Amino acid sequence: MPFAARAAGASAAKNACVPLIVTRDLRKVFRNAKRFPGALGALRGLFSPVYEDRVAVAGLSMEIERGEFIGYIGPNGAGKSTTIKMLTGILVPSAGEVEVAGIVPHRKRRENARNIGVVFGQRTQLYWDLPLVDSFELLRAIYGIPQDRYRRSLDAFIELLEMGDFLRTPVRQLSLGQRMRGDFAAAMLHEPPILYLDEPTIGLDVVAKEAIRTFVARVNREQGTTIILTTHDLADVERLCRRIVLIDHGRAIFDGPIERIKNEYGRERTLVVRFTETTSAPTIPGARLESVEGMTARFVFDRATQRVDRLVREVSDRYSVEDIAIEEPELEGIIRHIYTQGYAGEERSA
Amino acid sequence: MTTFAPYIEYARKAFAREATYRIELIAEIGSVVLRVYLLRSLWTALYAHNAAPTGLPLHSMITYTTVALLMSLVLEVDGTRVIREKLREGGIAVDLMKPIVVPFAYFSDGIGQTLLHAAAIVPSLLFALLLVRIDVPSLPVLAIFCCSLALGYGVNFFVNFLMNGVAFWTLETFGLQLIVRWISDLLSGQILPLSFFPGWFGRAVFALPFAAIYSTPLLVYVGIIPPAKWAAALAVQAAWLAATAGASFLLWRAASRRVVVQGG
């Protein structure tokens, strides 16, 4: 019996109505030796080390259902990678609970490993000096995939990811886009029910990015693979994920559908007005002037308190207007705002 | 369910990977042949001015150093060097996310590298034979030599494993690496027979694990360890193998509890 079906099947029977991934008050504190500046400082650190605690994950609770596509985002150092490492079982939590498909990952690292596939954008699991297909053969042996099933999934990946041309090329000669496609196939050859993607599109050109996105969306849709995507490319998230978990300073500061974060923060709209003549310091009641550039002015207003038709009427009554446009905020702008201003949910005033 | 299939594949891929470095292998063969010649000259000159030390005539000495150099082709392969490299670069995370026993995978990788480098023994030996004459012992001695070499290979692997495993705590092991390499080269009997060391020091070096790597198989080969003492000599090697393997197991267990993968 294929192991993937066996592993997933066993846990599915055991936990029919339990979420696939559960963390409860998950914490990870790193203890680092404090470094002192200079050569004498280095010596001091050597003989009387002083330790500092750094809280990477500070009480994270979340539940992820089978088949979800999660965008796990946050600024650098927020604790994203640490969380993923705990979910994969290679890092032991300092406190709290974690369960993936009914398994506590760090207790049964190898059993958990059969249920997961991992892609790192900045690191490859392929054998650098050997033809791409050699890495796939090694994975076939590692996961004990039967020859016929291996052949079938490899053929499918070769077609989907268009790998036919470079299957026998040493990995070090591949372009980044080709290598990433190889890494995706490598992570999914054993058909894992869970996929962790860590910045999978970093450094790729637009075409390669789009190919990867299309592939991942398809895997999630057709095979029901649960995917957790960690990225700084919010276009990836906007395109692929239905739910966002936003983490900062080791805490989830937002967890919900993309629409909600957009509604809460997307209350601000920008009214872009192009005048027929140069207009210094134009004003519209109920809107804040953001900038004036030549004959174009940008006003920011709160969609919840101000009506667009009134603002448009006001501005055209007062000035000679050539064109008016309304801009909606993009996810990237919203997230940038939260990173710099902090998240305050519903209470935030416009 | 544990099968050997993944580990056999790790060894095969390591063999294939090493085989892509052809120039390096050719250089290695050249280096061994050159060293065989230099050491022959050195020992010939030394023996010309001194009485032969205890029971080791010149031809035995040359046999000893030549076989030691051929052994180094397989024993200098450090399959655990990857631990240090992968800890620095964070690649160890990728291995730990696989359903494998990671030290087994590294051991298999080392075996694959060793097998390729072992292939270099034949041409090295042929070239060496053009320069020196070495004694060829009887079949039983060769058989015991091979067993002893296999045990020595195991001890060597675990000594390297322990040394590289320190990187889990320090991340940097280069200094330690140099010191252990020096000590090991000298005290394992790779450069000269351990019986050359005088007094208590001479007795102490036989009590260290390094002697189980080069010295025991070589002393079996040149006949300084007589058949009556074979069992005892191999038992000491086996004991060191068990001890270093046990220590490696403890180190790995402690290390996997505190994996700190670099970066991110």
Image (cartoon, coloured by chain):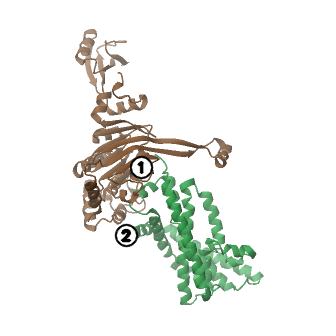
Chain colours: A brown, B green
Q: Position of residue A163 (x, y in %)?
A: 30, 57
Give the residue at x 51% y 53%: B88
What chain does mark 2 sit on? B
Q: Which mark is residue B5?
A: 2
Q: Which mark is residue A86?
A: 1
Relative to B233, does residue A95 appear above or below in the rendering?
Answer: above
The amino acid at mark 2 is: Ala
Q: Position of residue A319 (x, y in %)?
A: 28, 10
Relative to A106, does residue B123 appear above or below in the rendering?
Answer: below
Q: Nearer the viewer, residue B94 or B162?
A: B162
Relative to A16, does residue B189 appear above or below in the rendering?
Answer: below
Instruction: Work out which quarter of the rendered image holds the N terminus of chain A and state it.
Output: bottom left
* Residue B135 seen: yes
Give the residue at x 32% y 33%: A331
The answer to whether tags 2 and 1 share a subunit is no
What chain does mark 1 sit on? A
Q: Position of residue A59 (x, y in %)?
A: 42, 40
Density class for disc 1 (Cα within 10 Å; few <14, some 14-19, many ≥20) is many
- Say whether residue A344 is left or right of residue B143: left
Give the residue at x 47% y 64%: B103
Density class for disc 2 (Cα within 10 Å; few <14, some 14-19, many ≥20) is some
Query: Which SS class for mark 1?
Result: helix
The amino acid at mark 1 is: Met
